[in-house]
Image (cartoon, rainbow, N blue to C red):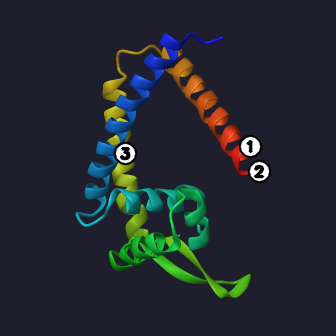
Amino acid sequence: MVESSTILALEHEMSVLVRRLRRRIAERARLVHPDLSPVGYSMLMALHDAGPQRASALVDLFGIDKGAVSRQVQLLIELGMIERKPDLADGRAQILTISELGRERLDAVAAARRVELTEKLGGWSDADLGDFVAMLARYNASAAAAAEADAG
């Protein structure tokens, strides 16, 4: 059984991490485009990482209402970061896909992010970093399984 002091320490460290990540996501969004919000940046990342999707998939992924997704999608289109194309499988639906400009901007931010991570973690051994990655992956898998159990 996990000690309550360990859980309290975990809560604290995760809170610090979340605050830091929110700040960094906002900064990265502005690097992609000065008018891009953190949520818009996250949606752009989702399209970059997972490929073309319907807006409804973004609603499910981010757990926000259709109106909020629609506003972010419209802004991303206006900024030239994504494109809306007909869904060949269902003529009534549309697929969102990242544009070449969106891909270029995200790739540039990702390259800078990797340099930053390399500098921040330069004092870590490969073994320590590998352990951290494995534990983070394990946590994410546990969180995903718990979310599925809650939903299903």
Q: Nearer the viewer, residue 77 or 14?
A: 14
Which quadrant of the figure contains the N terminus?
Answer: top right
> Mark 1 sits on what residue?
149
Q: Looking at the image, do the residues carrying marks 2 and 1 touch, with CB atoms under 8 Å apart?
A: yes
Q: Secondary structure at mark 3?
A: helix
User: Where does residue 147 sit, x and y in percent of width and height?
Assistant: 66, 44
Residue beneath disc 3: 111
**Foreground disc of the pair 3, 2:** 2
Please state which of residues 49 and 67 is positioned toward the viewer in this rendering: 67
The residue at 74%/82% (across/down) is: 89
Marks 3/2: CA–CA distance: 38 Å
Q: Which residue is mark 2?
A: 152
Which residue lies at the image location 55% right of the left edge and 21% below the top edge?
Answer: 130
Q: Nearer the viewer, residue 75 or 116?
A: 75
Position of 92 compared to 61: left or right?
right
Identify which residue is drawn at 34% across, 79% down.
78
10 Å neighbourhood of mark 1: few (<14), some, or many (≥20)? Answer: few
